[in-house]
Amino acid sequence: MSEPAPGPKLTVVAVPIGNLGDLSPRARVALEDAEVLACEDTRSTKKLLTLSNIANAARSLAYHEYNEQQAAPGLIRLVQEGRRVVLVSDAGLPGLSDPGYRVLHLCREANIPVEVIPGAHAAPMALLMSGLPSSSYTFKGFVPKKPGARARFFAEEAHSAHVLVAYESPLRLAETLGVAFETLGERQASVALEMTKLHERCFHGTLSSLKAQLEADPPKGEAVLVIAPLPRRERKDRDEEGE
């Protein structure tokens, strides 16, 4: 089978979420060869390149949640001009709870191939660390900050057969666990903190016990919340009641 013909494409690169050793050889080559780096924060990307000993004088452009709609068409034009454009976020994969969706959607509309170079991503890592069923899960990004939206966020998953994975700030974590308990009832859950970093931890328990534990000893670092689905027996009972 012949190799696909070279042509304009957008390259999406996963960068480490903490441990610099997780930068893959492919990601390193892409960052070294880039002519344009579209960055969530140009300072963070510059620091990554420096710490990883990557020498590149590529043009750096800001591409973040506040300018994504305006910046995406310009990135598409650069790709169409034949520039080697690489999209990165501050940590993990762009487009997954980080800026990236708009330019990826425009690539689809313009029939521009997207090359994704994989790497660390906190959601599936936390799922595996949780010990909860991993064959099927729903990743919903960040839990909303406002109380009403936060309650609806969990209510939408009340009868789901899938494990729920979401991100939360350590400042709101105990409160969010309380809302999850009030909305979903008692469930098995886990909270992963400081993924891939020196003080990586994962707490296991029920929603109420985790709330009490983390309320008494507030954690530091970004958190990934993993919550078990409604047990099969209860889903079956609810379905039979609805018939």
Image (cartoon, grey):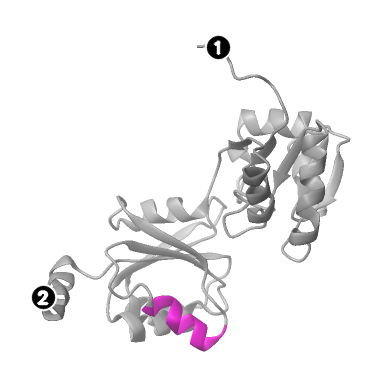
Which residue was labeled with disc 2? Answer: 240
Q: CA distance from mark 2 to mark 1?
A: 55 Å
- Kind of residue at disc 1: Ser
**Residue visible at 67% across and 55% down in the picture:** 102
Q: Is residue 16 magenta?
A: no
**Amino acid type for the residue under numbered disc 2:** Glu
The picture quadrant where one finds residue 155 is bottom left
| 23 relative to 1, above or below | below
Q: In the depicted view, which residue is nearer to us: 30 or 125?
A: 30
Q: Which residues are magenta?
A: 146-155
Q: Which disc, if any, is residue 2?
A: 1
In this rendering, the answer to whether 198 lies above or below 207 is above
Q: Quadrant of residue 205?
A: bottom left
Q: Residue at x 48, y 84 (%)?
A: 175
Considering the whole magenta stretch, tell me its main secondary structure.
Answer: helix
The total of numbered circles placed on residues is: 2
* SS at badge 2: helix
Taking the magenta stretch, the answer to whether it contains residue 148 is yes
